[in-house]
């Protein structure tokens, strides 16, 4: 009852250590050694320090003493509990402890809170304990505030949207420090039960307003209105929280139900994972079969094309064979004709004169060629005579022209002589033409 009314500020550090049994912990001696080590979470811790109580004098200055000791405690715990390492909400709890006590004592108290007050389970990466708290708190709302529960469901306003920080920081990020510290006093004495009580009391006191709001309006109400409702003093909130009916046995029952649900979900997840794996393997198998089917289809098409080409090639060969046979028949006919011609030539050759006749014909041919030569010589001589007579005749004409102009008788004699020379010349020309004609006849006969 004294703790519920509030622990005096000057005794808070000692009382908190007594409540959680954090005095003389062996791990306190390891603190200085832990600070010399390097933690993989150092960058994350440095990043979040400036966002932890940014308006508090002890922490608001960069690289201040408050930020440095906060970094030291968070780093040391991240090395002690490597599974949890560092979680942002835990910095607010450590910051509140450092406002009350030195860093070594704050480190020991924080270790006890994590181990004995379910905080370690809340801050695990899986956050399974946080899920359990959300389930239990939602069941309490459904039982004690059914109308508000239905409204939350209709607006898809899930419990984790407003209540997660309540459990992770024990209302340190929700209410001002004086109110949050009073709630933390009770948490040190009674554990997470006070979070369920205060949370449900807050909803009861704001039910009427929340029922009039949609999701966005409710979020604004939780962020801006509720934190300042109890600025005049936390007693009203503390009294209201202990009017809430909290059944520890029912909470244990809800824990079992949640465990069963999660186990079933895990089994379903395992089954879903197995089915997805099997589905992926089947898809891969289908893809493989489709590729094989496509390959077989291509091979079938190629085979059909090859078969068609082979059929066309066979038809072409058959046509060429027929053509070859026709050519062979024609060649046989031509060969037979040539053989007949050879026989005929042989017969004609057998009917030709014998060698004596050939010799006689050759002698006659020689004689004909000799006569031809004599005729050519005679023709040449005649042509020369004609030429000589023509020249003689021309000279004669040249001498007699204009010489004899005396009596007519002399002219008559001259005319007769001229006519005689002309006749002789014509006779010589005629004989030459006759010999030339005979020569042509002989040539024709020889051919």
Image: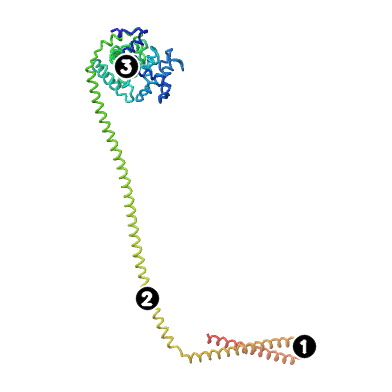
Measure the C-alpha gap from mark 3 to mark 2: 116 Å
The residue that label 1 is drawn on is 403
| Nearest to the observer: residue 297 or residue 248 | 248
**Quick check: 5 left or right of 67?**
left
Q: Residue at x 29, y 35 (%)?
A: 276
Q: Which label belongs to residue 213?
A: 3
Q: Examine the image and state in which quarter residue 278 appears.
A: top left
Measure the C-alpha gap from mark 2 to mark 1: 89 Å
Structural crowding at the residue carrying mark 2, measured as other residues with C-alpha within 10 Å and reported as few (<14), some (14–19) or many (≥20):
few
| Nearest to the observer: residue 36 or residue 256 | 36
- Residue 376 % position (x, y): 61, 88
Q: Examine the image and state in which quarter residue 206 appears.
A: top left
Measure the C-alpha gap from mark 3 to mark 1: 171 Å
Please, what secondary structure does the residue beneath circle 3 have?
Answer: loop
* Count of numbered badges drawn on the protein: 3
Answer whether labels 3 and 2 touch (C-beta < 8 Å): no
Q: Which label belongs to residue 87?
A: none
Q: Nearer the viewer, mark 3 or mark 1?
A: 3
Structural crowding at the residue carrying mark 1, measured as other residues with C-alpha within 10 Å and reported as few (<14), some (14–19) or many (≥20):
few
Please, what secondary structure does the residue beneath circle 1 have?
Answer: loop
Q: Earlier in the sequence, mark 3 or mark 1?
A: 3
Q: Which label belongs to residue 333?
A: 2
Answer whether labels 3 and 1 touch (C-beta < 8 Å): no
Q: Earlier in the sequence, mark 3 or mark 2?
A: 3
Q: Examine the image and state in which quarter residue 312 appears.
A: bottom left
Q: Earlier in the sequence, mark 2 or mark 1?
A: 2
Q: Is residue 258 above or below residue 176?
A: below
| Nearest to the observer: residue 96 or residue 12 | 12
């Amino acid at each position: 009852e004294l703790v519920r009314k509030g622990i005096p500020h000057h005794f808070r550090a000692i009382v908190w250590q007594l409540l959680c049994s954090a005095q003389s912990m062996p791990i306190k001696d390891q603190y200085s050694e832990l600070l010399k080590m390097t933690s993989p979470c150092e960058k994350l811790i440095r990043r979040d320090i400036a966002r932890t109580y940014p308006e508090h004098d002890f922490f608001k200055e960069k690289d201040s003493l408050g930020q440095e000791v906060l970094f030291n405690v968070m780093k040391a715990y991240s090395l002690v509990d490597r599974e949890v390492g560092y979680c942002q909400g835990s910095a607010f709890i450590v910051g509140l402890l450092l406002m009350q006590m030195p860093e070594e004592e704050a480190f020991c108290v924080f270790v006890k809170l994590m181990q004995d007050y379910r905080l370690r389970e809340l801050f695990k990466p899986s956050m399974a304990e946080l899920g359990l708290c959300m389930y239990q708190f939602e069941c309490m709302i459904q039982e004690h505030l059914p109308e508000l529960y239905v409204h939350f469901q209709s607006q898809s306003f899930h419990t984790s949207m407003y209540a997660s920080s309540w459990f992770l920081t024990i209302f340190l990020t929700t209410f001002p420090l004086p109110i949050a510290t009073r709630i933390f006093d009770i948490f040190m004495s009674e554990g997470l039960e006070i979070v369920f009580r205060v949370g449900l009391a807050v909803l009861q006191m704001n039910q009427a307003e929340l029922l009039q709001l949609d999701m966005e309006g409710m979020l604004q109400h939780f962020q801006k209105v509720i934190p300042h409702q109890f600025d005049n003093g936390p007693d009203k909130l503390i009294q209201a929280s202990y009017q809430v009916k909290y059944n520890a046995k029912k909470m244990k029952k809800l824990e079992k139900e949640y465990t069963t649900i999660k186990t079933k979900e895990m089994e379903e997840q395992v089954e879903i994972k197995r089915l997805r794996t099997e589905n992926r393997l089947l898809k891969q198998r289908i893809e493989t079969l489709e590729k094989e089917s496509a390959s077989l289809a291509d091979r079938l098409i190629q085979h059909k094309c090859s078969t068609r080409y082979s059929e066309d090639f066979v038809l072409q060969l058959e046509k060429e064979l027929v053509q070859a046979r026709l050519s062979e028949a024609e060649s046989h006919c031509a060969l037979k004709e040539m053989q007949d011609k050879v026989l005929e030539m042989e017969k004609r050759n057998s009917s030709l004169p014998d060698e004596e006749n050939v010799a006689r014909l050759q002698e006659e041919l020689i004689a004909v060629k000799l006569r031809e030569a004599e005729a050519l010589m005679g023709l040449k001589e005649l042509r020369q005579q004609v030429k000589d007579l023509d020249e003689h005749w021309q000279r004669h004409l040249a001498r007699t022209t204009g010489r004899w102009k005396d009596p007519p008788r002399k002219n008559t004699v001259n005319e007769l002589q001229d006519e005689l020379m002309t006749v002789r010349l014509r006779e010589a020309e005629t004989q030459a033409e006759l010999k030339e004609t005979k020569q042509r006849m002989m040539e024709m006969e020889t051919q």
